[in-house]
Amino acid sequence: MKEFVIKNLALWFRSYSQRKNKVTPERILFAAGKIMRSQKYCFLNTAADGQVYSRVLQPVYPNSDFVVHFGTSPLSRKVAQIQKNPRGTITYLDSKNGAGATLAGKFEIITALELRKKYFVASWWAFFPAGPEGDDFVIVSFTAERIEIWDASRGLTPEPFGLKSAMAVKAADARWQLTNS
């Protein structure tokens, strides 16, 4: 009986989500922004030396162009990996709403003092006692080029349901457009 109820609820949810499914670049960007701003942490993912690395970081909320900033030590492993390969992803998970967004793009290490001050978050004093002016602090800037999202609460569930993300890529003219890959 329990399995029957769960199966029917799952099938109802699938049907409901499929009826709401309206994937457009604008809806992908809107949902990604909502997910990103609702989460305190995300995963920063790099690849170097034939390995993939992932770590949890506290981002500065994204701007309207989906540029995200992080604070770190210039001696960190992530900085060394980014210097070898600036391409990577950041991933946000909103488990409360059953949604997630992964952004693929490029990282850049920023050492300019004015930008270190601009993006420094007060809680980071615990990790960087000298603050944004210290030699042990840099900004990692991430610029998104592709956004993948799955968000049933906002009707972003392309077919086949649950097996594919809605995706948008930034074109050469800086406009976002739908993509399948």
Image (spheres, rainbow, N blue to C red):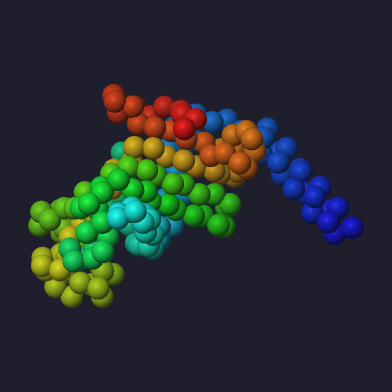
Quarter of image, res 60: bottom left
Where residue 71 appears, as percent x and y from the top left, is 24, 61
> Is residue 74 shown to the viewer in this render?
yes
Residue found farthest to the front = 50
* Residue in front for this viewpoint, 120 or 87: 87
Residue drawn 79% across the image and 54% down it: 6
Where residue 142 appears, as percent x and y from the top left, is 28, 48
Residue drawn 55% across the image and 57% down it: 95
Q: Is residue 118 left or right of residue 65?
A: left
Residue drawn 31% across the image and 38% down it: 65
* Residue in front for this viewpoint, 130 or 109: 109
Where residue 11 appears, as percent x and y from the top left, is 76, 43
Q: Is residue 171 above or below residue 30?
A: above
Where residue 34 appears, as percent x and y from the top left, is 45, 47
Tag count: 0
Quarter of image, res 124: bottom left
Quarter of image, res 116: bottom left
Q: Quadrant of the N terminus?
A: bottom right
Q: Is residue 71 above or below residue 63?
A: below
* Residue in front for this viewpoint, 152 or 148: 148
> Is residue 121 shown to the viewer in this render?
no
Q: Is residue 139 left or right of residue 10?
A: left
Residue drawn 22% across the image and 52% down it: 84
Q: Is residue 103 left or right of residue 63?
A: right
Q: Is residue 15 left or right of residue 108?
A: right
